[in-house]
């Protein structure tokens, strides 16, 4: 019975002591002279809207669906190169001219098919009128229809072959009207963009599908960042990226799932938005990944103290300091970003917080 009373008394003492700590956690009363003796330095909160996560090397690349290889559609000799590296071209613009003997044969077959279709059309129109008047037999009309359809199919076939060879509808119309054969084949730009690379020289013989130009639409660019795997937990899709020494911002659109065996980093890809005149495709730069935050404040790491797994700062009042719990959003070097029940006008202790913590927890000497 006495033992039980002994433990009960100890528990009551513990509760009283715990309550005193809780009460002490709200504020600390200090005279101005004692404050000076503790060597405490005061500072102000600095409002921030973003927090740096990490800085890593990155490369400017062209999105895969914005880049095109212009190839030779026929075997021939490069007669003329019109576009050069760096030129801005429009869709359909002539880039080069190819002299192709095969093109002459394709044009000849197309014109032959047109002539046969024209003759077949006369027979078709004549027999159509005769069958309506009952002058010719049904069998003859069916033969005439079949022959006309064969001529029409032959024309469409030769026309499609010429289009696959790179002949435009305007050039086909000109060929149909003039009936003049030409071995010169114009190579046209498939998109509007910039000539990134020219891969042939004038007078060079090229085979079918040989690459001639690389053209890219640079309205969008990618920023490919190499992130150490141990920092991957700090990065997510939607985070912002700043490009060093430029006003350019980008947004993360992909976080890779595999590690590069050469440098043991993960690929993080960001889409560059806005003015892209400050960077060029293929350029290597430094990129800083940041997080956008609301009601964040930057303070020195020395302004934050830890107690029972929580973070606190000491806010100056007329009698001493209020102890305010805060959340540490992140750290960068000697500074941290915090948020909590703050207005931004508070004055806080940024040095000497160890002494204040001791005073707060009742470990310091009396004044």
Image: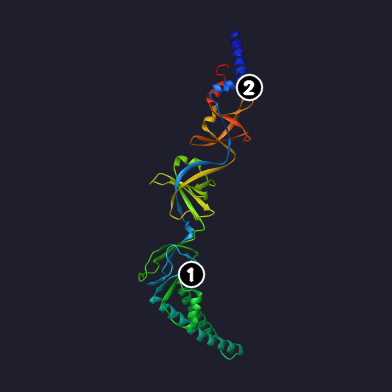
The scheme the figure's colours follow is rainbow
Residue 141 coordinates in the image, percent (x, y): 55, 86
Tell me residue 94's x, y (percent).
46, 70
Residue in the foreground of this view, choosing between 266 and 79:
79
Name the residue nearer the viewer: 231 or 161.
Answer: 231
Q: Position of residue 243 (x, y in %)?
A: 49, 48
Residue drawn where x is 62% and y is 15% of the image: 12
Mark 1 nearby-residue class (10 Å; few <14, some 14–19, many ≥20): some
Above or below, 345 against 194 in this view is above
Residue 260 is left or right of residue 2, and the answer is: left
Sequence-wise first label, 2 or 1: 2
| Image quadrant containing the N terminus | top right
Which dot marks residue 325?
none
* Vertical comparison of 46 with 30: above or below: below
Q: Taking the image as drawn, is residue 246 in sight?
A: yes
Q: How many marks?
A: 2
Q: Residue farthest to the bottom? A: 135
- Residue extending furthest left? 204
On the image, numbered disc 2 is attached to which residue? 23
Which residue is disc 1 drawn over? 93
Write down the quadrant of residue 182 in the picture.
bottom left
């Amino acid at each position: 019975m006495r033992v039980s009373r002994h433990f009960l008394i100890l528990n009551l003492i513990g509760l009283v002591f715990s309550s005193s700590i809780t009460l002490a956690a709200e504020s600390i009363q200090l005279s101005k002279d004692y404050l000076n003796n503790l060597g405490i330095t005061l500072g102000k909160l600095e409002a921030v809207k973003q927090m740096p996560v990490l800085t890593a090397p990155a490369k400017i690349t062209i999105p895969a669906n914005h880049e095109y290889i212009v190839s030779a559609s026929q075997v021939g000799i490069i007669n003329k190169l019109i576009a050069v590296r760096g030129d801005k071209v429009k869709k359909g613009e002539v880039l080069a001219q190819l002299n192709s003997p095969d093109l002459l044969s394709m044009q000849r077959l197309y014109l032959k098919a047109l002539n046969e279709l024209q003759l077949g059309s006369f027979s078709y129109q004549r027999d159509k009128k005769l069958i309506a008047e009952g002058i010719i037999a049904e069998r003859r009309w069916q033969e005439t229809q079949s022959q006309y359809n064969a001529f029409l199919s032959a024309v469409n076939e030769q026309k499609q072959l010429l289009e696959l060879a790179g002949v435009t509808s305007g050039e086909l119309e000109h060929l149909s009207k003039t009936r003049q054969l030409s071995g010169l084949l114009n190579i046209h730009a498939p998109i509007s963009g910039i000539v990134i690379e020219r891969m042939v020289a004038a007078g060079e013989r090229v085979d079918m599908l040989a690459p001639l130009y690389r053209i890219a639409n640079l309205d969008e660019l990618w920023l490919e960042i190499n992130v150490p795997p141990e920092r991957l937990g700090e990065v997510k899709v939607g985070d912002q990226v700043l490009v060093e020494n430029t006003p350019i911002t980008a947004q993360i659109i992909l976080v890779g799932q595999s590690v590069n065996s050469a440098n043991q980093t993960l690929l993080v890809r960001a889409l560059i938005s806005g003015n892209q005149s400050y960077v060029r495709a293929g350029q290597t730069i430094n990129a800083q990944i940041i997080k956008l935050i609301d009601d964040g404040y930057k303070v020195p790491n020395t302004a934050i103290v830890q107690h029972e797994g929580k973070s606190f700062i000491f806010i100056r009042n007329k009698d001493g300091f209020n102890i305010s719990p805060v959340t540490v959003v992140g750290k960068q070097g000697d500074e941290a970003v915090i948020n909590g029940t703050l207005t931004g006008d508070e004055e806080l202790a940024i040095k000497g917080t160890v002494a204040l913590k001791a005073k707060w927890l009742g470990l310091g000497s009396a004044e």
